[in-house]
Amino acid sequence: MTNESAFIELRRATPADRDLLAQAGRACFVETFGHLYRPEDLAAFLGTAHAPEAWQRTLADPALATWIAVGAAGCAAGYAVAGPCKLPAAGREPLAGELRQLYLRAGYQRRGLGTRLLETALAWLEAAGHEPLYIGVWSENFGAQRLYARYGFQPVGEYLFPVGQHRDREFILKRQPVYQQ
């Protein structure tokens, strides 16, 4: 972690963060993946997945935990969402957990903040009794795949992730509980 990331407040999100998360969710997705999609597909996805109402539902769900990283100016640098696994993994265990989202704004990447968010979410999932743990990651997001591999995640499947009418090939990664590794 660099000194710069130490000035980022990482905390559990509250319903008051709904609009900030919606804004950050849209910005992170566009910065990272926006160039891949037709404008109408991107708009359809952002209008549902990152609408304030979608974030309101996420924040109200007691089975989910959301963290937000806030910079000194009060802007969202990134966020993570974790909870029960919903990925279409073959033979998915009943107590399986999932890191559902982990995104950083471009200007905050490579500062250790992604690692802080990841470790926070993984610790919460384990403390909540979720095992094993899963992550879905875009098949061409090699940096994220390397990060997750360092934390013991291995590919176990694939699925198609809808962005409007477009379908992305995603990998399903799984990490066994520490005592089983």
Image: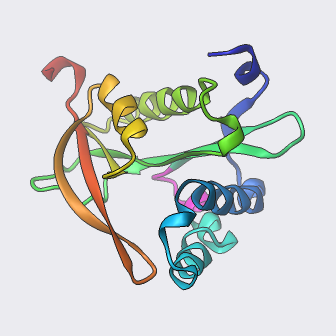
Residue 42 percent coordinates (x, y): 55, 75
Q: Is residue 63 magenta?
A: yes
Above-or-below relation of 130 to 4: below
The residue nearer to you, when weighing 16 against 104, is: 104
Question: How far across and how far down the image is residue 18, in percent?
Answer: 72, 60
Residue for point 9% across, 53% down: 91
The picture places residue 109, in percent across and down from the top left corner, at 62, 35
Give coordinates of residue 68: x percent, y percent: 67, 42
Residue 128 vertical placement versus 47 (above, below): above
Which part of the image, by quadrant, shows the C terminus? top left
Q: Residue at x 46, y 33 (%)?
A: 124
What span is in magenta?
58-64
Q: Residue furthest left?
A: 91
Count every numbered label the image shows and give the total: 0
Is 146 left or right of 46, judged from the image as shown?
A: left
Q: Is residue 177 above or below residue 64?
A: above
Residue 96 found in image quarter: top left
Tell me if 91 is positioned left or right of 78 in this view: left
